[in-house]
Amino acid sequence: MEDKNESTQVSFTIFILKETAAHEHRVAASPETVKKYTSLGAKVLIEKGAGTAASFTDKAFKEAGADISENRDEALAQADIVLCVQGTAEIAGHMKKGAILIGLLSPYDNKDLIQKAQDQGVTAISMEIVPRVTRAQAMDVLSSQANLAGYKAVLDAAEHYPKAFPMMMTAAGTVPSAKVFVMGAGVAGLQAIATAKRLGAIVSATDVRPAAKEQVQSLGGSFVAVEDEEFKEAETAGGYAKEMSEEYKKKQAALIEETIAKQDIVITTALIPGRPAPKLVSEAMVKSMKPGSVIVDLAAPNGGNCELTKADKTVQKHGVTIIGHSNTASRLAESASALYAKNLYNLVELITDKETKDISIDWEDEIIKGVALTKDGQIIHPQFGGAKETQDKDAA
């Protein structure tokens, strides 16, 4: 096995970091993707213990063809590509000029990272902003992670809900089905609907995007929304939810208030890229819920959809349990890492020439234009400070 690895032409080095952020248990590679990287012509370095929290051992990575690094700064300085889950300015600051940083870089909030990548001459590629085009579906990190988060949200609710989810008819009496209301029918919300239905709950959902109605109903849920003219135009060309007017919000809030009072479990998933999470569940709505009810707020890291949510805490208010984990996908670390690692591999494969087995970026590719923040000491993404004319000049 060693001879086989040694005979493979190595054209560039990939370094996979051990994550240091609180509540982060994921890793940016799996043994499966390590094997694929070596076949692309890469030498793979993994920081010691990087996969432990995700059940990927150093031994498994070594058997897949990686070398284990115990010197983080040294590995960062020599790597051509650095893969991470949560990117930081500190990481970019230790990378060599011309190297590529790929991960969840939080471009809307992490201006220091973008600036450091610019100063360091590092190409920063942010996986949160992969364009929603067919070619990029296999790189869609937000979808792969949100899918798991939606599933886990229902399990979290079931853990704290003091009753059973399905209807149970017994000689001792009947246990009624739990009523679950999902707010936001994106990837996480749809998975939450499907999971709650599998557990036997009666499920309803709401979303400001008209296309969500059919999706909710296809999973067996009922759709709740004020379906006026504004509602019919409440979706961007990219498939994201638009910010709604104050008038619409008031009408929708009245309908939601009426609906929430009848629910046992509420799961909120509403997020708008680059903005604080919209407040959808007021304290008055929480008070209207039955004692023992549960709210799972997947928007907790962005401030929460519920007024009473506390990030990274499970609290009880007015007899209702409110769950606010800030990194729900990470709580399914092995599955989340495996999917995330594949998303990253598909992006790296896109920027690798299969014939020369070296890095080769097509700066005219619509996917690259969508995800690249910096290049050659300049910010090139117009949404984050790059000038359109500068981007065109560089591409030429």
Image: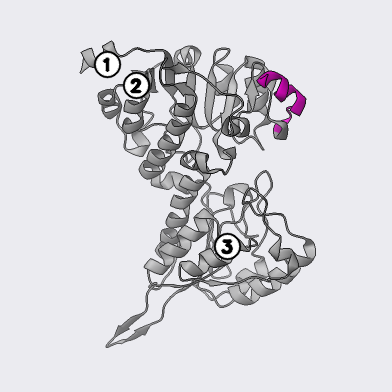
Instruction: Name the residue type under label 2.
Output: Thr
Q: Residue at x 32, y 34 (%)?
A: 56
- Whether residue 140 is visible: no
The front one of 79 and 351 is 351
**Label 3 crowding class (10 Å Cα cut-off): few <14, some 14-19, many 20+?**
some
Could you give the CA–CA distance between mark 2 and mark 1, rounded to whole angstroms? 8 Å
Asked whether the beta carbons under mark 2 and mark 1 sit within 8 Å of each other, the answer is yes
- Residue 384 picture quarter: top right
Q: Are marks 3 and 2 in contact (CB under 8 Å)?
A: no
Kindly identify which residue carries mark 2.
38
Task: Report the span colored magenta.
Answer: 384-396
Q: Amino acid at mark 1?
A: Asn
The residues tagged by marks 3 and 2 sit, at their Cα atoms, a distance apart of: 41 Å
Residue at numbered disc 1: 5
Q: Residue 31: image x %, image y %?
A: 31, 31
Residue 347 visible in the snapshot:
yes
